[in-house]
Amino acid sequence: MFSRILIANRGEIALRIIRACKELGVETVAVFSEVDRNASYLHLADERICIGAAPSAESYLNIPRIIAAAEIADVEAIHPGYGFLAENAHFAEICRDCKIEFVGPSVESMRALGDKIQAKELAKAANVPVVPGSDGLVETEEDAVRVANEIGYPVAVKAAAGGGGRGIRFAHNEVTLRSNFNQAQSEAEIAFKDGRLYMEKCIQNFRHIEVQILGDRTGNVVHLYERECSVQRRQQKVIEETPAPELPAELRDAICDAAVRLAREVGYHNAGTVEFMLDADGNFYFLEVNTRIQVEHCITEMATDVDLVKWQLHVASGRKLAMTQDDIHHSGASIECRINAEDPDNDFRPCPGRVEALVLPGGPGIRWDSHIHQGYVIPPTYDSMIGKLIAYGPTRSEAIATALRALDEFVIGPTKTTAALCRRVLAHRRFARGQWDTGFIEREMLGK
Amino acid sequence: MAEQAAKKPTGTSSPQQPEAADAADTSATIGEVRQLVQLMIDNDLHEVEVREGEKRIHLKRGGKLQAPAVPLEPVPAGESAQPGAPEDRYTPAQQAGPGAETGLIDITSPMVGTFYTTASPDADAFVAVGDAVGTDDVICIIEAMKVMNEIRAECAGVIIEICVKNAQPVEYGQTLFKVKTA
């Protein structure tokens, strides 16, 4: 195991990694930007290094400064968390060139899976179902129209360098396809420095099912079952749960086995998530692989009793997985509510600023993963998620009841958050019945 | 790792909109500077200092016009470090406490790395306490990822304190030198 690592992240995931390290006896070095200087979780790290001003480009995304900090702090590894540089293959490569271990998969896996077109090819090679589409790049408007006529409208135009719901445009007919195509190219060029596009048949109102995988460097790969993340707003997850409700056992096994096949095909090690779309007819299609630990990893930890962040550190330091697939058991149900500092009544406008009042939920079956505290000043510079409320119960309805009463205990002010929205979703009769898809929030809650 | 004293956060809950206000303030201040320069020429003055709230303009005549050593935008008192705040390397000594001398500024590190007082192990130190420094003078080296970066004073004055030791790791924003500019 490493004796000292650097955490190239901030907020709740930085705290999550510090916690795992403390329990493993690993010293931690936390980097921070000037605007995060007063965050109390920094004092739980063994060392803190200021790496720059607030803008991410000058701090959490600044590779030279992070590497410089790693060198002066003499760490053996860097844990990138999620977001920021977590899926940046170039960063992973620089770490390893500087003889610093990157807690994540190999550079080659990250490159291959980060390119959405290549990822699809790998999925096909692993016999994983993929969405019918362009089978490669679509370079011109005429090509796009031809592909659309083959696969049928509506279609999705996607950036090869995109991911996480970004860089996607939809077209319902030739007119909108033509007008969207060139815009999609320029947007991708600006956002990802890569204007390459591909197309897929648009699967509407699908369920988003993802599988947690974990591999070691000797080629062992296990899955830790699935998560359902269908309750989303503008392609961003709001509520996640495990197990995916109303999923027949054979379908669950098929999806999870497909994820493991793909991971083996790529030689994947460390933690990752394979995402799928499940349509109303029970067909599942590969969406993408996230080559990092995810926000919602906590619900899998609750249901399987496996500490994923600790295992990331074990695998990165060379240890073999101690469990086979048969050793992984999923029991009970777990739900996560993402609490964002946003005002749902004002188009989800971000609400940075000082947290004056804070009362946290507790009691049986509740886990609160967050870096905020009373007096904490939420900076406007970063992601608006300020905490994750995780509920666990022996059954789904008990987990929902636990989450509801915990949300009622939760007090925060004057900061506006999405906690009340989460409560409305969980209390909704359709949620209780497991009748929803990615269009749920827009349709049912926002009346669109 | 030396840490700067934590500032008490008092942040605001409204979203930041600094750009328009800053532009107006900067152009107003440049206008004022022009007027002051003309005033000095007309009256054969050598040095002028004007203060207005948090804003301070200090002009010295005789040779080149000196750039003000404090940000032109007024920094509101009591707010925690804002993302829109100027990326200025200097923090006026007013923040050091009520007993601070005027004309004292901190030169802070613009990067993370290892601080060196000399160009090489056998060379003399770039500066010593009591030395006068000018804007372009190299005052130290910060090494990061095997690259030796020369750090310049970017102000004029006298070194009154060297705050870090040779070969000490430094973080972004860490105070390296205290310089008296008046």
Image: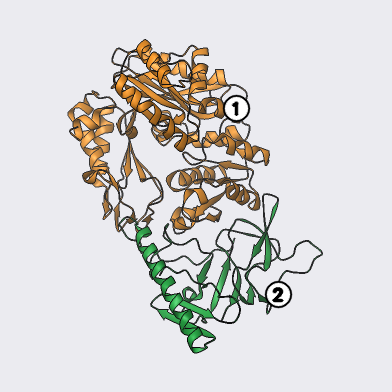
Chain B, which colour?
A: green
Kindly identify which numbered label has been placed on residue B128: 2
| Image location of residue A163, percent across then percent down | 44, 30
Q: Is residue B1 left or right of residue B39?
A: right
Question: Where on the picture, by quarter, is residue A362?
Answer: top left
Dividing the image into 4 quarters, which one contains the N terminus of chain A? top right
Residue A284 pos. (x, y %): 37, 15
Which residue is at the far right? B122
| CA–CA distance in space, label 1 to label 2 | 50 Å
Question: Which chain gets the orange colouring?
Answer: A
* Image point (49%, 40%), residue name: A81
Chain identifier of the residue bearing label 1 in the image:
A
Which residue occupies the foreground of this view, B103 or A209? B103
Residue A269 visible at all: no
On-image quarter of the C terminus of chain A: top left
Which residue reaches farthest front? B42
Q: Are marks 1 and 2 in contact (CB under 8 Å)?
A: no
Q: Give the side of residue A419 with respect to residue B103, left or right.
A: left
Mark 1: which amino acid?
Glu
Q: Residues within 10 Å of mark 2 (few under 14, many from 20)?
A: some
